[in-house]
Amino acid sequence: MSNKGGVQRLLLVEDDVKLAGLIANFLGQHGFEVLLEERGDRALARFERERPDLVLLDLMLPGLDGLAVCRELRRLHPEVPLLMLTARDALADQVLGLESGADDYVIKPVEPMLLLARLRALLRRGAVAAPPAPAPLRLLGGALRLCAARREAHLAEQPLLLSTQEFEMLWALGQRAGQVLSRDELLQALRGLEFDGLDRSVDLCISRLRRKLGDTARTPALIKTVWGRGYLLVP
C-alpha cells in the first residue's frame, strides 16, 4: 500500500461523473488522494497499476458491473478494504455486494460524513499492528485455524476465502469462543460503531460465515444464535 506522508490513496470506481467529483472533492479535503475510474472493465487494471489503500466501488458500472469487479478484486487481493455504493433502500443490492466480498456498503444518495466514517473504520481494521502479533487460534477441535498476522483462515486444512469483514467477525468470535457476543460488540469489532437496532451487517456477515464454514442454515452447529443476546462460536 502506498500511504505516503499519511495520505491514503482511494480508487473510486463510479460512472456518475458529477457524484464522483463531489466525493473526490470531499475526501480530498479529509486526507485522501482519490483516483477516479468510470468503467468497471478498466478498474482491475487501474488497481494493479496504482495499488491504492482502499476501493470505493459503485454497483452499476459500464463494461463490467461492480459485483464482478468486487469478486475479482477479492480473489486477487483479499486484504484490500472495499466499500460498495448501493442504490437507495435496495436490500438485495446490499446483500449481493456483501456476498461478493465487499467489506461494507454505503447507500446512495451518499451522506459524506457517514462515508468518511466508514472508510476510516475500514482502514483502522485493515491496519496491521506491530508485534507482538496474536498467536494463531485453533478452534473446533483444531479443525479451524485463524492467523491474524497473515489474515488467513483454514478449515480442515482447506483455506477459507474471507473478506476483511468476515475475517474480523470470525476472529472476534474465536477470541471469545464459547461466550455470547452481542450485535453491539460485534459491530464495534467490525466498524467501531454502536449498534442502532437497524444495522443488519452483523447478521448478513454471520450468514455468509456459516455458509463458508459449512454450517447448516436451519440448525447451525458452529456459530449459534442466542436469541435476544447475540452469537457465539462453539469452542
Image: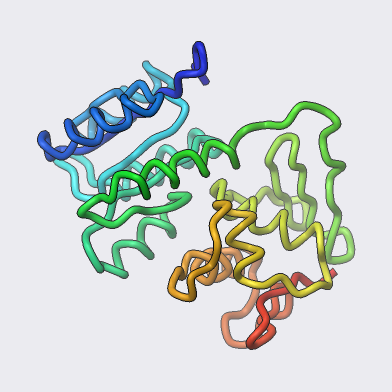
Q: Residue 130: percent from the left, percent from the top?
A: 76, 27
Q: Residue 123: percent from the left, percent from the top?
A: 53, 36
Q: Residue 163: percent from the left, percent from the top?
A: 54, 48
Q: Quadrant of residue 138?
A: bottom right
Image quarter hosting the C terminus: bottom right
Q: Residue 169: percent from the left, percent from the top?
A: 64, 58
Residue shown at 44% from the left, 47% from the top: 118
Residue shown at 69% from the left, 73% from the top: 223
Residue shown at 23% from the left, 46% from the top: 65
Q: How many marks?
A: 0
Residue shown at 29% from the left, 62% from the top: 93
Q: Is residue 178 left or right of residue 33?
A: right
75 in relation to 207, above or below: above
Closest to the observer, 102 or 87:
87
Q: Is residue 235 left or right of residue 155?
A: right
Name the outermost residue toward the top.
Answer: 5
Q: Is residue 68 left or right of residue 171?
A: left
Closest to the observer, 141 or 182:
182
143 in relation to 151, above or below: below
